[in-house]
């Protein structure tokens, strides 16, 4: 898995930026507030070391790391996966880290039988195979490549009429209902895109389908986007996206929810595991999909359902009859997490950095473009250490195994170490691949001021403006209306977007309550071979970050982030942006309620008026939507009151920081520093409720969580939000008091930190 860049108006952004640099205008960007959390004496020393660090990052080293790590297929359980882990272990040791490999054992199915064939109206056998290309040297490593499949599909052997379901989201099934088409007893074919792939078989099964096929339409990542591979970088005709379809109840090993998958862990049976799909599913190329889609009749698909194939898209059902068969080897495979520590002078506090090292095949882009830069960061930190630099806090570099199947390596490691992590971890910084373009940080907004400061001090390799400036201007270009543009212009920081899951930050943020950042560049891609055999060194060095300029920018950004987090006198948090974000999430809930009330009131009125009957074309059968119960009012007051206290205490903390800066940030007493840090370390944990989300107890964080039906996407305040999405208004209302309680507790924690910071400043001469 990886976070995919889903931002749209790339062209607009690049045009705006080239226009601006062409005119030589200096954009109005707020000036640097200095290093958050640093006293002025330590800031001077820190800046010096950071400059040395950034100057020492070498793109050719990143290229060489990628060449080595992506030289052979290295999925979980493969020989080269272990080989890579051992090679990285040796490297970390060579660079002066205290490094080890921690092994876990998790369920990882691999395919034994895969069949997709059409029996009616004509016979067709899908190839289910990505061809070797002579120009691409690693595409021929067929003996080591995992076949094209979706991991954690249940075994099954089904034959049924085919139905096209667009992206296969819940809204697509509402549309099918309107057309009077049921998928009960059918096999559905969905296209990739618009949400996480695992949602497609989940929702299909909930609607009575007995099988699911997912294909890559060229509109998403093929010839519609640009020249396809190998002439260009986009997915070719027979390219297939592998990927996990593990259900969203909990990430990690399906057999050991909530506890580490150690050798002697108590395990569920495969039958008991809740995260395996309910119906069989396989991914295919559009070369394999085209005959199936062409054989469908029934209504023509709505405009927005059509892809870029040269056919009229019909929905079915049938007359295409399809046979789908999936059988897997349900083996337990070892995971090799490489954990490397550079001990700080204060070993009590840890700053963690991670990227996964396993791939679906060679994985040059996903994940090695991230991992290769992470290694270069570690090399250079080791080099600084040799020159006399020691971080205050300990720095822990993690190369995770088993991310692709379901965040296996990081989840099991966090589950194994959760108590220590809660006692010691200051923050976790993730990446999962990297490309050319912009930095749009994700994470918890207590680090928003901090990461904006880092971005000011790294140069963008293409425009030579700061990474901050470029991202800030890109946010103006991407703003959806004049109001958003105007508020973006006034911002003094980059907006940190909430993360759901989809990469290795998940267990840190959602399970252990650790402040999190996701740092990657992207959005200027010239192609995509996501989870294909063609995501390899040849492809990456011809079509992606070919000179590793952005690999260097990632290492500089994330390495500076690590140094700065590890070296600050005060843990460099600032709570006001987080309080603002939580207030916004609450306002979104209120708006959602209002929108649903309006929508259902209007719909019920139109049903009574006969609008749907009047609009129905008898030649195109349609069914009016069902009448809906208009949602009752909910009582958001407890949450709003709690957020008021959160805002007030956060502002006090921000003001105290500003007052310290206004005095020139003189050194604070050791005792006050350790008091404030002890307060701050606790705060992010206070957003947890150990009972977890009502329907997904593994997810403890009451602010940050993924949606059960969005997969990667964040659903802030999920305890309330998910019930609202399910139209369970009473249950949603019932969750508000406990979320309010969590926010109040966190607000009190911030209040305590503000008290202690205020008195530390009052003690200054
Ligand atoms: Zn990845």
Image (cartoon, rainbow, N blue to C red):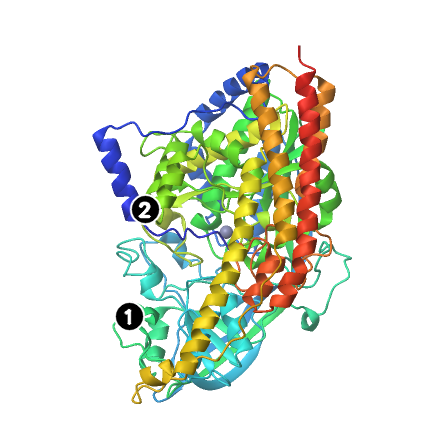
As measured in the structure, the alpha-carbon distance from the residue carrying label 1 to the one carrying label 2 is 27 Å
Quadrant where the C terminus lies?
A: top right
Check the image and name the residue furthest to the left.
Answer: 23
Q: Is residue 128 visible?
A: no
Is tag 1's residue or tag 2's residue first in the polypeptide sequence? 1
Tell me where residue 332 appears, x and y as whole percent: 66, 62
Q: Residue at x 33, y 84 (%)?
A: 614
The percent position of residue 488, horizontal first and vertical second, equals: 39, 39
Crowdedness of circle 2 by 10 Å Cα count: few (<14), some, many (20+)? some
Residue of label 1:
309
Work out which residue is located at the far top of the displayed protein and give it. 765
Name above or below for residue 98 compared with residue 715. Answer: above
Give the residue at mark 2. Answer: 542
- Quarter assignment of residue 674: top right
What element does badge 2 sit on? Answer: helix
Q: Crowdedness of circle 1 by 10 Å Cα count: few (<14), some, many (20+)?
A: some
116, above or below 739, in the image: below
Residue 225 position in % (x across, y down): 29, 57
> Do labels 1 and 2 touch, CB within 8 Å?
no
Residue 88 picture location, percent across and down: 57, 40
Compared to residue 557, the image places residue 195 above or below, namely: below
Q: Secondary structure at mark 1?
A: loop
Q: Is mark 2 within 8 Å of ligand 1?
A: no
Nearer-the-camera pick, 366 or 722: 722
Of residue 506 and residue 726, the one placed in the foreground of this image is 726
> Is residue 272 among the parts visible in the rendering?
yes
Q: Residue at x 61, y 50 (%)?
A: 703
Q: Nearer the viewer, residue 218 or 656?
A: 656
Q: Nearer the viewer, residue 98 or 586?
A: 586
- In which image quadrant can residue 27 be found? top left
């Amino acid at each position: 898995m990886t976070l995919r860049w889903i931002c749209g108006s790339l062209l607009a952004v690049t045009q705006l930026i080239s226009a601006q640099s062409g005119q030589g205008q200096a954009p109005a960007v707020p000036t640097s507030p200095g290093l958050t959390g640093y006293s002025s004496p330590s800031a001077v020393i820190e800046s010096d070391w950071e400059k040395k660090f950034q100057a020492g990052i070498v793109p050719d080293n990143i290229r060489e790391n990628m060449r080595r790590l992506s030289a052979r297929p290295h999925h979980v359980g493969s020989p080269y996966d272990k080989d890579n882990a051992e090679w990285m272990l040796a490297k970390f040791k060579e660079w002066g880290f205290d490094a080890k490999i921690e092994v876990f054992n998790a369920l990882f199915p691999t395919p034994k039988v895969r069949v997709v064939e059409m029996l009616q109206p004509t016979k067709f056998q899908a190839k289910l195979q990505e061809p070797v290309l002579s120009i691409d040297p690693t595409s021929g490593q067929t003996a080591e490549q995992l076949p094209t499949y979706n991991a954690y599909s249940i075994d099954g052997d089904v034959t049924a009429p085919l139905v096209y379901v667009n992206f296969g989201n819940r809204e697509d099934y509402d549309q099918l209902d309107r057309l009077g088409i049921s998928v009960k007893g059918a096999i559905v074919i969905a296209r990739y895109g618009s949400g996480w792939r695992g949602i497609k078989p989940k929702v299909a099964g909930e609607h009575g389908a007995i099988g699911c096929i997912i294909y890559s339409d060229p509109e998403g990542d093929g010839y519609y986007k640009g020249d396809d591979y190998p002439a260009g970088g986009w997915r070719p005709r027979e390219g297939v996206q592998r990927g996990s379809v593990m259900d969203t109840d909990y990430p990690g090993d399906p057999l050991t929810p909530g506890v580490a998958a150690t050798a002697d862990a108590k395990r569920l049976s495969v039958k008991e595991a809740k995260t395996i799909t309910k119906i069989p599913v396989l991914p295919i190329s559009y070369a394999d999909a085209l005959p199936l889609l062409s054989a469908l009749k029934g209504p023509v698909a709505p405009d927005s359902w059509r892809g870029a194939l040269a056919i009229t898209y019909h929905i079915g059902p049938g007359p295409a009859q399809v046979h789908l068969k999936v059988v897997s080897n349900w083996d337990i495979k070892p995971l090799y997490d490489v954990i490397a520590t550079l001990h700080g002078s204060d070993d009590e506090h840890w700053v963690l950095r991670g990227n996964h090292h396993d791939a679906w095949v060679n994985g040059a882009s996903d994940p090695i473009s991230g991992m290769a830069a992470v290694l270069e960061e570690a090399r250079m930190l080791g080099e600084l250490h040799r020159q006399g630099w020691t971080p205050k806090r300990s720095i822990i570099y993690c190369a995770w195994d088993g991310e692709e199947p379901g965040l296996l390596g990081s989840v099991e490691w966090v589950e194994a170490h959760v108590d220590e992590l809660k006692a010691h971890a200051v923050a976790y910084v993730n990446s999962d691949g990297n490309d050319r373009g912009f930095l749009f940080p994700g994470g918890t907004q207590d680090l928003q001021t901090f990461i904006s400061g880092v971005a000011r001090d790294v140069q963008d390799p293409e425009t030579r403006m700061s990474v901050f400036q470029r991202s800030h201007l890109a946010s103006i270009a991407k703003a959806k209306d004049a109001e958003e543009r105007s508020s973006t212009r006034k911002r003094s920081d980059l907006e940190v977007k909430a993360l759901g899951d989809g990469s290795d930050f998940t267990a840190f943020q959602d399970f252990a309550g650790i402040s999190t950042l996701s740092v990657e560049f992207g959005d200027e891609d010239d192609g995509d071979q996501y989870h294909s055999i063609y995501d390899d060194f040849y492809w990456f060095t011809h079509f992606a970050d070919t000179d590793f300029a952005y690999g260097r920018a990632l290492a500089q950004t994330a390495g500076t982030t690590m140094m700065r987090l590890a070296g600050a006198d005060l843990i460099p948090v600032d709570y006001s942006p987080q309080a603002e974000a939580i207030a916004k999430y609450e306002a979104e809930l209120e708006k959602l309620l209002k929108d649903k009330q309006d929508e259902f009131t209007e719909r019920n009125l139109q049903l009574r008026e006969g609008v749907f009957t009047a609009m129905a074309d008898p030649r195109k059968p349609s069914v009016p939507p069902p009448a809906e119960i208009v949602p009752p009012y909910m009582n958001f007051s407890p949450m709003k009151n709690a957020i008021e206290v959160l805002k007030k205490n956060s502002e006090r903390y921000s003001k105290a920081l500003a007052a310290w800066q206004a005095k020139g940030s003189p050194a604070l007493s050791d005792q006050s520093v350790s008091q404030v840090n002890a307060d701050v370390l606790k705060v992010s944990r206070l957003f947890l409720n150990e009972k977890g989300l009502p329907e997904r107890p593994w997810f403890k964080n009451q602010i940050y969580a993924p949606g059960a039906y969005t997969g990667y996407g964040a659903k802030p305040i999920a305890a309330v939000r998910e019930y609202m999405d399910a139209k369970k208004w009473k249950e949603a209302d019932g969750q508000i008091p406990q979320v309010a309680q969590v926010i109040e507790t966190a607000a009190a924690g911030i209040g305590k930190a503000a008290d202690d910071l205020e008195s530390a400043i009052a003690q200054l001469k």
